[in-house]
Amino acid sequence: MNTKQIINGQSQFYADLIKETNGTNRGWYNLIVSIRDLKLYEFGMKPHSRWKISDVKNYFGIQGNATSMRSQLEEILEAIKG
């Protein structure tokens, strides 16, 4: 599947991902951390006190519950890596 079909081009994630940086890309970092956070949330743990699942939905432009969102983010990760 094409990366452009998976990533919402209107999301803040896409804007951060295509931005040129000298260090670690903010979009890439947020993708990795959000996958970790959703795994914790699936087990009933909030990653930190101010964390909200709606922030993840808004940042990546995706919908669903924690499990489906994690799957979508893992697909994005594989598409970018592959």
Image (cartoon, helix red, strand yellow):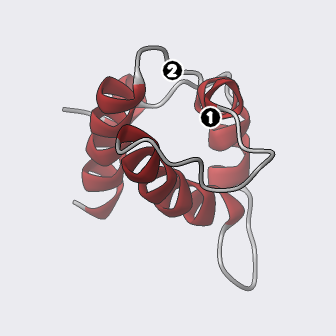
Q: Which residue is at the far top?
A: 63
On the image, numbered disc 1 is attached to which residue? Answer: 56
In the rendered image, residue 75, in percent from the top left (x then y), is placed at: 27, 41
In this picture, is 12 found above or below 54? below
For the residues labelled 1 and 2, the Cα–Cα distance comes to: 8 Å
Q: Looking at the image, which residue is at 73% across and 67% down? A: 20
Query: Which amino acid does the dot numbered 1 rest on?
Result: Val
Secondary structure under tag 2 reads: loop
Identity of the residue drawn at 63% across and 40% down: 14
Number of numbered discs overlaid on the protein picture: 2
- Left or right: where 62 falls relative to 60: left
> According to the image, label 2 marks what residue?
62
Mark 1 vs mark 2, foreground winner is 1
Residue 27 is situated, as x and y percent measured from the top left of the image, at 63, 55
Q: What crowding class fits label 1: few (fewer than 14 Cα within 10 Å), some (14-19), or many (20 or more)?
A: many
Instruction: Name the outermost residue toward the front.
Output: 44
For the N terminus, the image quarter is: top left
Where in the figure is residue 35, as x and y percent of width and height? 43, 52
Query: What residue type is disc 2 on?
Result: Ile
Q: Residue at x 77, y 50 (%)?
A: 49
Q: Find out whether the residues at labels 1 and 2 contact each other: C-beta distance under 8 Å.
A: yes
* Helix, strand or loop for disc 1: helix
